[in-house]
Amino acid sequence: MSSARLICRKRGIARRLKAGWHRGDRLLCLDWTLLRLFPPLRATWALKGTQAVVPITGRNAKRVRFGAIDLRSARRVVLIRTRAGQADARAFLCALRRRYRRAGWLWLLSDRASAHTAPQTQALATRLRIRFVWLPRQTPELSPMDQKLWGYGEDSASSPAEPAKGAPHAPVP
């Protein structure tokens, strides 16, 4: 997408927010990411020069991390689930409203994932005083979630913990 077209779309988002914004409303950016869990590979260490034993479970476990970041305060709300379906998206909307009980409308900058656009999700959002502001398609650079929050979370979740300094190895779980 050309930069001129992207600027026009960003201005359209800003106009929509200004038109409906009330005192007490909050603007959050919403997204979810899939994390694959390979604990044996992350937690296995061996003495220098020896072969590490890596237990294989045969399971490819995963977790889905739903997250939102308040663009004013940088406060994050995270919910970890085993799936990324419509019910999970609705559970996250409820968690957001619980966190922001006293806020006016919650405005969520979001992609058009099917769990977000589902009629049941939209109906719940309206009942919870949540409005979606759709990001243009194929523009992940507009989402701070993709740029900052998930990059940090994936790095911290997938980096192995080094053994303590001076320790010959860390225990294998």
Image (cartoon, rainbow, N blue to C red):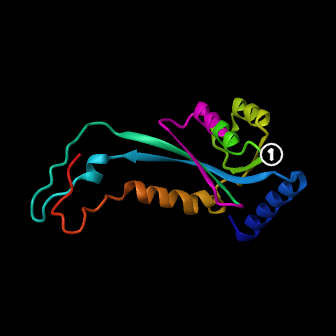
- Quarter of the rendering occupied by the N terminus: bottom right
From the viewer's perspective, is 117 left or right of 131? left
Q: Nearer the viewer, residue 172 or 101?
A: 101
Within 10 Å of the Cα at label 1, are there few (<14), some (14-19), or many (20+) other Cα atoms?
many
Residue 148 quadrant: bottom right
Which residue is the extreme one toward the left?
A: 50
Q: Nearer the viewer, residue 74 or 136?
A: 74
Q: Residue 95 colored magenta? A: no
Kindly state the secondary structure of the residue where label 1 is placed. Answer: loop
Q: Position of residue 138 (x, y in %)?
A: 64, 56
Q: Is residue 80 above or below residue 155?
A: above
Q: Position of residue 84 (x, y in %)?
A: 54, 37
Q: Is residue 19 above or below residue 101?
A: below
Instruction: Count up the numbered dots.
Output: 1
Residue 143 quadrant: bottom right
Q: Residue 92 colored magenta? A: yes
Q: Position of residue 127 (x, y in %)?
A: 78, 33
Q: Is residue 93 above or below residue 110?
A: above
Q: Label 1, on which residue? A: 105
From the viewer's perspective, is 102 left or right of 45? right
Residue 124 quadrant: top right
Q: Position of residue 8 (x, y in %)?
A: 80, 64
Q: Nearer the viewer, residue 155 or 104?
A: 104
Please report the residue visible at 11 percent of the width from the left and 56 percent of the height from the top: 51
Residues drawn in magenta: 72-93
